[in-house]
């Protein structure tokens, strides 16, 4: 599933995106705004913001996003790995006016690269408080952050909860990058694709004794 | 013609997609018997022209075939009337109606789910109580059960804010009792999917209470601490086994969805409670959670058929190596803060070693063997080894220290005493 890619021979992509960042930087509101009014009725916990899904259509390809929110408080940091495993993408959110929250992002980047390598697409998002104006300090700071993001192979965005446009862009771009990664992986696998499909199967039964199996398997019906 | 079709199916990796042809009948293809020796049951089921795919068989014929078979055997036929494939399955004799065969029309897109369900019913249902008892006995004998109960009891005394809840209103005693009953009901189910959907209902209930009291929507920052609080209040140590059961047996494709998310959260909440008493729990948990998850992940993706006992957290498998006798291995309860010294005395006790002072714990890989100094932590070493991108094979070996005279105690204390063999 880490390969995450196309389930049905390239028709639909299913991606898992994990949302990381210090508590209270507003990662939840960011994703809520993005998925607003697009809740899936099938989901039991409709209208909750911890787990959200979104369907997209990008250049004729269907994309299903599953967005996993995480608890950002320090005491939950250790649980990170159980949430980000198998993720195709990560959105790392910090508050532009809070140096500590950016430090946390840097720690996450380090950890994600160590654990998941380059297969995971990273987005770093600076949240801009609405009261704040873009002064010179902040602009300078953003230049610095952008170059950091580039150095770790991530993209940087800054957005306020009011500006939906930034958020749309961010997700669209992330999806495109995840698609590229998945396609590259598919190409690498080449003909081995059918094998990987079977490894994703729900039930695995492996014979211990390949030789001299008695006649009549468990499901044969004659 | 049949041979060709089979070849095509094998080559194209078609598994559950039935060929669109009517006249194949129930003949077995000639290559089937030789194939079965080289293929797993599942591969046979999915990649060969399967014995259960009998498209031309009528309902009456299906009945005749299945009546001679034991319960659980099924076939797939095509119904002209319904214009659909139908799964006919032999069940236990029904006393009232006298029938023992059921027919389920199947939509092509549902094949996987139907088969998964059938497998659960045929295989998992009879095994459920055995699995449960084994897991429970294992937990009890290792001491993990007792510890979990103690930790739960301690966590239960904590106020919501002590577990990280910040502002949201927790469920009251009545709601907690309701959730507790639901969690207890979960134990009766054998289907991992059903268990997960019950878990989702519990989560929904918690959300509803939080939301009703505030009118706002909550993300993980608020939900995870609340779930931890609720799990602690419910005081049902059995939930731990339930979570393991679901994580091991849920269809992997569902692990990325909503069920997977809340299962992960439940696992997280349980981990927090399990590590409640440990000092500086958070820091250790990171490597430990990584360790467990790494192994779990490998198990669920790399076709490993059986989980080893030592894959679970807080256990360490140690082999006793005696010259001329070979190896005996035991699985020991080793917590993250258990030192090598303590593990050694545990080994001496478990392996009944009279001259324990001559023995030490070694970390053995393919090329090296390293004596561990008494103040190191084997679990942390294990976690570190597992977190490396290219995991090496390694073993913890308890054995006699060679050349005792050369191994000065001070040297051992100061760190590693490498001995390449």
Image: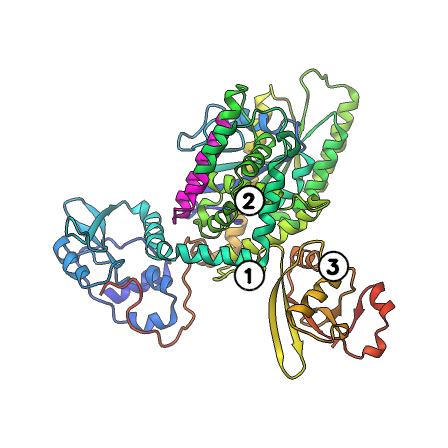
Q: Is residue B186 magenta?
A: yes
Q: Can residue A13 be seen here?
A: yes
N-term-proximal mark, 3 vs 1? 1
Q: What residue is rendered at 21% in x and 50% in y?
A: B102
Is disc 3 in the same subunit as disc 1? yes
Q: Position of residue B30 (x, y in %)?
A: 25, 71
**For the N terminus of chain B, which image quadrant?**
bottom left
Local crowd at mark 3 within 10 Å, few (<14), some, or many (≥20)?
some
The residue carrying mark 2 is B267
Which mark is nearer the camera, 3 or 1? 3
**For the C terminus of chain B, which image quadrant?**
bottom right
Between the residue at mark 3 and the residue at mark 2, the CA separation in whole angstroms equals 26 Å
N-term-proximal mark, 3 vs 2? 2
Q: Does residue A206 appear left or right of residue B220 in this picture? A: left
Between the residue at mark 3 and the residue at mark 1, the CA separation in whole angstroms equals 21 Å
Using the image, determine if residue B1 lies above or below residue B80: below
Local crowd at mark 2 within 10 Å, few (<14), some, or many (≥20)?
many
Query: Mark 3 falls within which chain?
Result: B
How many numbered callouts? 3
**Element under label 2?**
helix
Q: Picture quarter containing residue B218? A: top right
Relative to the observer, which residue lies in front, A194 or B260? B260
Local crowd at mark 1 within 10 Å, few (<14), some, or many (≥20)?
some
Relative to the observer, which residue lies in front, A149 or B313? B313
Q: What residue is rendered at 60% in x and 68% in y?
A: B330
From this viewpoint, which residue is outermost toward the bottom?
B324
Magenta-highlighted residues: B182-208
Q: Picture quarter containing residue A32? A: top right
């Amino acid at each position: 599933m880490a390969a995450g890619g196309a389930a049905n021979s390239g028709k639909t992509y299913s991606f898992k995106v994990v949302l990381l960042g210090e508590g209270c930087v507003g990662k939840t509101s960011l994703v809520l705004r993005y998925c607003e009014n697009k809740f899936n009725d099938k989901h039991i916990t409709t209208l909750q913001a911890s787990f959200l899904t979104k369907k997209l259509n990008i250049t004729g390809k269907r994309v299903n996003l599953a967005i996993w929110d995480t608890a950002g408080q320090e005491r939950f940091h250790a649980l990170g790995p159980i949430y980000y495993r198998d993720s195709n993408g990560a959105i790392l959110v910090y508050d532009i006016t809070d140096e500590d929250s950016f430090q946390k992002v840097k720690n996450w980047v380090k950890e994600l690269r160590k654990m998941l390598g380059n297969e995971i697409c990273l987005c770093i998002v600076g949240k801009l408080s609405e009261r704040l104006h873009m002064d010179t300090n902040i602009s300078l700071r953003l230049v610095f952050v952008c170059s950091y993001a580039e150095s770790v192979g991530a993209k940087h965005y800054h957005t306020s909860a009011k500006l939906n446009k930034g958020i749309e862009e961010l997700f669209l771009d992330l999806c495109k990058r995840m698609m590229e990664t998945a396609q590259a992986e598919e190409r690498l696998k080449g003909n081995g694709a059918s094998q990987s499909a079977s490894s994703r199967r729900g039930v695995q039964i492996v014979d211990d004794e390949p030789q001299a199996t008695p006649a009549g398997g468990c499901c044969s019906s004659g | 013609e049949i041979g060709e079709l089979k070849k095509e199916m094998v080559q194209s990796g078609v598994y559950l997609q039935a060929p669109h042809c009517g006249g194949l009948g129930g003949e077995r293809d000639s290559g089937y018997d030789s194939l079965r020796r080289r293929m797993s049951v599942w591969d046979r089921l999915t990649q060969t022209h399967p014995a259960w795919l009998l498209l031309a068989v009528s309902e009456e014929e299906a009945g005749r075939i299945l009546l001679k078979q034991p319960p659980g055997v099924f076939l797939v036929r095509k119904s002209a009337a319904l214009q659909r494939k139908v799964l006919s399955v032999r069940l236990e004799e029904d006393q009232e109606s006298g029938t023992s065969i059921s027919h389920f029309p199947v939509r092509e897109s549902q094949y996987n789910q139907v088969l998964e369900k059938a497998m659960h019913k045929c295989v998992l249902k009879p095994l459920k109580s055995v699995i449960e008892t084994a897991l429970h006995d294992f937990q009890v004998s290792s001491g993990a059960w007792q510890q979990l109960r103690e930790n739960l009891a301690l966590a239960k005394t904590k106020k919501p804010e002590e577990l990280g809840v910040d502002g949201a209103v927790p469920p009251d005693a009545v709601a907690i009792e309701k959730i507790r009953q639901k969690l207890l009901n979960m134990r009766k189910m054998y289907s991992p999917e059903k268990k997960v959907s019950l878990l989702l209902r519990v989560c929904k209930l918690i959300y509803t209470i939080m939301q009703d009291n505030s009118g706002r929507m909550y993300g993980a920052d608020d939900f995870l601490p609340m779930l931890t609080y609720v799990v602690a209040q419910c005081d049902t140590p059995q939930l731990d086994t339930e979570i393991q059961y679901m994580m091991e047996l849920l269809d992997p494709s569902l692990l990325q969805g909503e069920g997977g998310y809340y299962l992960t959260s439940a696992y997280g909440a349980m981990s927090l409670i399990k590590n409640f008493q440990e000092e500086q729990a958070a820091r250790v948990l990171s490597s430990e959670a990584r360790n467990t998850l790494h192994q779990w992940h490998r198990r669920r993706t790399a076709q490993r058929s059986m989980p080893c006992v030592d894959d679970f957290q807080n256990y360490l498998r140690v082999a006793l190596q005696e010259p001329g006798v070979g190896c005996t291995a035991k699985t020991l309860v080793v917590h993250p803060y258990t030192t090598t010294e303590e593990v050694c005395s545990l080994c001496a006790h478990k392996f009944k070693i009279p001259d324990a002072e001559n023995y030490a714990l070694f970390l053995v890989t393919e090329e090296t063997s390293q004596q561990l100094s008494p103040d190191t932590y084997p679990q942390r070493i294990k976690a570190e080894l597992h977190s490396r991108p290219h995991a090496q094979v390694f073993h913890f070996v308890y054995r006699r220290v060679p050349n005792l005279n050369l191994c000065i105690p001070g040297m051992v204390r100061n760190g590693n005493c490498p001995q390449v063999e």
